[in-house]
Amino acid sequence: MYRSMMLINGERVEGASGRFEIIHNPANQEPVAEVAIGDVIDAVKALEAAQRAFPGWSSVSARKRCGLLHDAAEIVRERADHISKLLTMEMGKPIRDSRREVLSAADSLDYFAEEGLRNIGEWISAGDTRSIVVKQPVGVVSMITPWNYPVELLAWKAGPALAAGCTAVAKPSSLAPVAATEFVMAINDAGLPPGVLNIVHGSGDTVGAELVTNPVSRKISFTGETSTGRWIMEAAARHLKRVSLELGGHAPMIVFDDADIDAAAGACVRRAFGNMGQVCISVNRVYVDDAIAEDFAEKVIRRTLDLRIGDPLDPEVDLGPMVSERQRRKTREHIEDALRKGARILCGGREPEGFTRGYYFMPTVLTDVDHTMCIMREETFGPVAPIMRFSSEEEAVRLANDTEYGLAAYVYTNSLRRAVRTAERIEAGSVGVNIGSVIDLQAPFGGWKQSGIGRELSHRGLEEYLEIKHIRLGL
Ligand code: NAD
């Protein structure tokens, strides 16, 4: 069985307690890896290692730091098969998607290696004074990540933090720590000095909480549930730590009567069911103009029935299992709540036949839904597309904004005016117009309302790891 160790101060170690936990494959419940489990003491050791490494790493030239990040990206690419396989086996993502995630994580490292060279200050002349404005790394960063994109989301943090000159301690989710750890090992193997990037395993309320509350770390970069983010922000307030929070989402998709219905239906199926709906920017609510609602639903159902469910290691498979029984139960409960309140199932709504050992669930399309139902208000994090009709643009925008979240939204229309008007009125950090993806390394990503604070990716993602200093010179 695979053994996943922690990395503290450049050494592969087990935790002080010597404890290991077995990670099981959600597709068949077979053991995948034994994972060294850390405790508060290990988190402290890792933070102290990062603190010792900070003066050296932050004073290395940006060119050298960023060169190492490019080397790290190459090593990740060389190990992509190995890392993707572990990722699929620990959390059930189809191997094609795992590979895409790992390669995209390598691209993020390359991107921030370039962005890190553009950390350029300002020079202001004023009579007999001069002002220099410089941006310096914030210090030691705690990076806490979820299980649904354990490699890519860590790359979005490690890339800019290391490029900026910060040192870091990462803590992946206990549900999927193995591929994230391999990713950190690969970055270290590019020749990072010991202690620059550490990774510890363990539960949120021990290791995670220590990374949040210990004053050694100056910043917390967190991706996860909104409720956890709230707790982190409160705890961080005690030391006025910087926080970036990428939290939950409940993305609406609006399909107007003038849209390319095929394109919209395709995007809906990919975005609602990809990664089994376990994505913060999944389509969670679909609003369709009355005039095209039936046609649209038919096209969505046809495409949904074409999806291949199976062993996620099979490269032909579109959908694997969900990550855990807990996620599957929540999905079932949200569907049952909707049915009790009048919704109808158009397809799916149950476990597929013949998959008794894994946490499989059929991609589900619902209709006759309304906003009293949990599925239209809370993050299900499962493969469900509820379709609701609207009769005016005004109503569509009101329904789309009737949520406490504001991460992503999608709009399908062939009217440029309507596209711009709608995109501008939607309360979300990203809006995809006639496109079912809102991720672009060069553009900022983050949430409005209860979906978070701060931005990842783009030059703004780098700024999150930099403090501003004004140096005034008297001549
Ligand atoms: P989670 O909040 O349960 O856990 C995330 C991480 O926080 C894990 O590593 C966990 O161990 C740690 N944690 C838990 N309690 C903690 C505490 N008290 N102190 C410090 N750390 C703690 O989230 P999850 O179930 O792993 O992930 C799913 C959630 O993540 C969904 O809500 C999803 O929308 C969100 N998410 C958001 C984005 C985004 O970019 N906005 C991306 C992916 C996932």
Image (tube, rainbow, N blue to C red):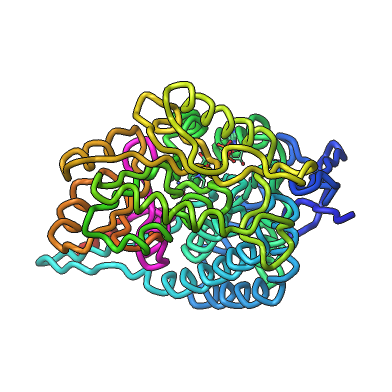
Please provide percent x and percent y for residue 263: 36, 64
Residue 444, quarter of the rendered image: bottom left
Residue 183, quarter of the rendered image: bottom right
Above or below for 11 versus 103:
above
Q: Is residue 262 visible?
A: yes
Q: Residue at coordinates 25% horizontally, 44% vertically from top-left?
A: 290
Please provide percent x and percent y for residue 214: 58, 35
Q: Residue 455 lies in magenta, yes or no?
A: yes
Which quadrant contains ligand 1? top right
The foreground one among 89 and 454 is 89
Q: Return the residue found at the far left.
A: 127
Task: Please state if 301 lies on the left or on the right of 450 as rendered.
Answer: right
The foreground one among 274 and 50 is 274
Please provide percent x and percent y for residue 93: 65, 55
Quarter holding the N terminus is bottom right
Quarter holding the C terminus is bottom left
Task: Please state if 231 lies on the left or on the right of 75 as rendered.
Answer: left
Q: Residue at coordinates 42% horizontally, 56% vertically from top-left?
A: 299
Q: Which residues are magenta?
A: 439-468
Q: Is residue 452 visible?
A: no
Above or below for 474 versus 361:
below
The foreground one among 238 and 446 is 446
Residue 305, quarter of the rendered image: bottom right
Q: Residue 194 lies in magenta, yes or no?
A: no
Please provide percent x and percent y for residue 431: 30, 54
